[in-house]
Each structure stands twice: as structure tokens, then as C-alpha cells.
Image (cartoon, rainbow, N blue to C red):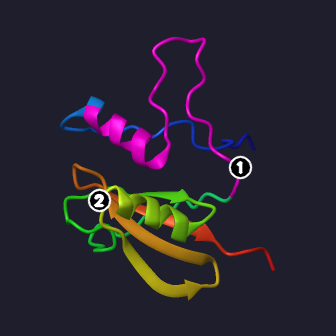
Amino acid sequence: MEKVTGIGGMFFRAQDPKALAAWYEEHLGISRVPTDYDTQPWMQDAGPTVFAPFSSNTDYFGRKEQAWMINFRVNDLDAMAAQLEAAGIKVERDLEEYPNGRFARVYDPEGNPIELWEPAAPR
């Protein structure tokens, strides 16, 4: 069976796409979509990716009308949280350390939830 090899893009509606793309670039290091075919788009590190449909009545994403949430892997959750907080962004840290790692949550300027995940070290 032929399988997909990874996520090739994340596409979603925004009230102000240019401002939101600038926020993601400034605070999370995700470069904007290139305007030509000679420029490389944002390249992510290889690593685990969870693809998990949730029940339509979950409250895990926050607002009931929120249909998606993205989870970004980070190398150092404490450093990323400190960087975001220094920029005035509220970070909700999950103080529990899970077998698969540590988590925190932030919201982009349009209220979209972003989960930050520092995977646990391999055993």
C-alpha cells in the first residue's frame, strides 16, 4: 500500500492572514509561504507526528467552534515558554510530566490554540 510521507502543509482560514503569518514567523520561527518557486518553505525537523481525530464534542481544543488544533514539537519547552512570555504571550504550562513528554499551550492572536510539546527523551 502507498502511504503519505508526512504533512505537506497546514491550511486554515484567518481574519488577517498576513498579520497572523507574521506572528507565527516572529514568535515560533515558521517562515512565511514563499512568493516564488526558488525560495524554500519552512522546513520542519523529522520526528514523531500524531494524527488524532477527536470526538466532535471534545473540549480539549477550547472553544466549541474550534475544529482543529496544531501541536508543535520543541527542543526545550522552558526556553520556548520564556521566549514567548518575554514577548507578552500568555503560556499555559501543564505541570505534569507525561511518559511522552511535557506540554504547554498558547493562543495565536486570532484565538487558535497551539500546543507545544517537548517529547520525552528516548528510553
Residue 77 or residue 48, whichever sits in front: 77
* Quadrant (top left, top right, bottom left, bottom right) of the C terminus: bottom right
- Residue drawn at x 67%, y 59% as measured from the top left: 48
Q: Residue 54 at x, y = what percent?
A: 40, 67
Which residue is under mark 1? 46
Up-down relation of residue 102 to residue 67 (above or below):
below
Q: Is residue 25 left or right of residue 108?
A: right
Q: Main secondary structure of the magenta part?
A: loop
The disc at residue 4 is: none
Q: Amino acid at mark 1?
A: Ala
* Quadrant (top left, top right, bottom left, bottom right) of the N terminus: top right
Element type at mark 1: loop
- Residue drawn at x 67%, y 75% as measured from the top left: 120
Up-down relation of residue 97 to residue 6 (above or below):
below
Q: Amino acid at mark 2?
A: Gly
Residue at the right extreme, as displayed: 123
Residue at the bottom extreme, as displayed: 96
The disc at residue 88 is: 2
Up-down relation of residue 112 to residue 61 (above or below):
above
Q: Residue 100 at x, y = what percent?
A: 63, 77
Q: Residue 95 at x, y = what percent?
A: 46, 86
Q: Is residue 86 left or right of residue 3?
A: left
Q: Is residue 97 left or right of residue 32?
A: right
Element type at mark 2: loop
Residue 90 or residue 65, whichever sits in front: 90
Span shown in magenta: 19-47
- Magenta region includes residue 59: no
